[in-house]
Amino acid sequence: MLNVFFAYSHRDEDLRDELDVHLAQLKRSKIIGTFHDRKIGAGKELDKGISEFLEPADIILLLISPYFLASDYCYEIELKRAMEKHEAGEARVIPVILRPCDWKSAPFGKLLAVPRDGKPITSHKDPHEGFLEVTMAIRAAADELRGETRGTTDRRSGSMAPTPSTKSEAKPKGAAPRLKRTITDLERDQYLATTFDEISNFFKNSLEALKANNAQLQTAFHALGRQHFSATAYVDGKLAGRCGIWVPREGFHQRAIAYSQGEGGGTSWNEMLHVADDGISPYLTATGMLGRPGEAGKMSAGGAASYFWEHFLNTLRN
């Protein structure tokens, strides 16, 4: 389980609580555990308590607002340490834009902020849409981080308590990098099958969350084959958007996952992700047919699911 730390201003406590609610499914699935300063036990020193839980954090959420930027503690202590951990590769920092403010010149301004295009959550017609985008970004980051550590021993217990370091745990500098090798067809096929299943489960869960957070929305997930499904959304019973995702069986697009702004399954598609590798492990690449080619770079299964989900949501917004 990954540790997620909230850095925020107490003036934004209500929005922090709303985000924590949206992360319930990730917490229930034991993918993440969350921490913020309100969880520090009575009698404990605040600064030491925050440091105790910030240090082992795998994902650090910066909840950005004018109040966060104006807080000396948030800006000079939590933000500074968060960026140090991010640049050292010790944690993933995700700026979450809560309210309109002048944040792009801040030290985290170079990072990809959520919701999409840095649109503040409070500027959304329905703030739950913004929170859902943030949740999906956190899920994708968690999937990537879990993929990086899968198969290795995690010294952290999974709780929010840090594990004391010892000399025997120290990693030697200049450790040998992983050597390139030939990725077999079997590995590519297994990666494709596993990735499709993860995308399918991602859409099932996301459709349920979308329906739960929007009273006027109804959603449907249909398995149309062993590796083919459709996702549909209705607003007050009227069709609002549909997409199909499947694995093409023949032709040039072998070892690929296709996306169609319709039920899909044939030779017509709007985006295609292909299995590639760097001589170390497989990953996915996008053709860029849905715009901004190459934006996603090397995608993990979680990144691919979020990529498709974002475009599905765009059909609902239009």
Image: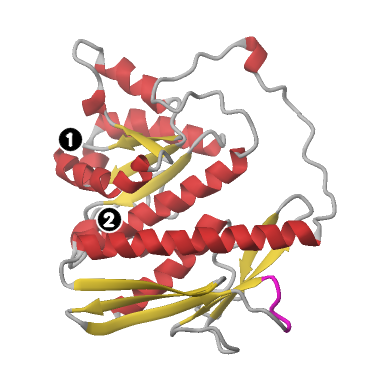
Q: Is residue 169 above or below residue 4?
A: above
Q: Earlier in the sequence, mark 1 or mark 2?
A: 1
Residue 183 part of the magenta-drawn span? no
Q: Do tag 1 and tag 2 residues touch (Cβ < 8 Å)?
A: no
Q: Is residue 113 above or below residue 77?
A: below
For the residue pair 276 and 238, the one nearer the viewer reads as 238
Q: Secondary structure at mark 1?
A: helix
Residue 290 percent coordinates (x, y): 50, 79
Q: Amino acid at mark 2?
A: Phe
Q: Is residue 253 above or below residue 89?
A: below
Give the main secondary structure of the magenta stretch.
loop
Residue 57 location, quadrant:
top left
Q: Is residue 109 visible?
A: no
Residue beneath the point at 18% across and 68% down: 125
Q: Which quadrant: the C terminus?
A: bottom left
- Left or right of 111 on screen, residue 79: left
Residue 62 percent coordinates (x, y): 34, 42
Residue 263 location, quadrant:
bottom left
Q: Which residue is mark 1?
A: 10
The disc at residue 131 is 2
Indicate which label's residue lies in the foreground, 1 or 2: 2
Around disc 1, counting alpha carbons within 10 Å, would you say few (fewer than 14), some (14 to 19), or many (20 or more)? some
- Left or right of 137 on screen, residue 188: right
Numbered disc total: 2
Residue 252 part of the magenta-drawn span? yes
Residue beneath the point at 69% across and 70% down: 255
For the residue pair 65 and 76, the one nearer the viewer reads as 65
Range of magenta residues: 251-255
Residue 260 percent coordinates (x, y): 49, 82
Residue 222 percent coordinates (x, y): 41, 74
Residue beneath the point at 23% across and 34% down: 71
Its colouring scheme is secondary structure
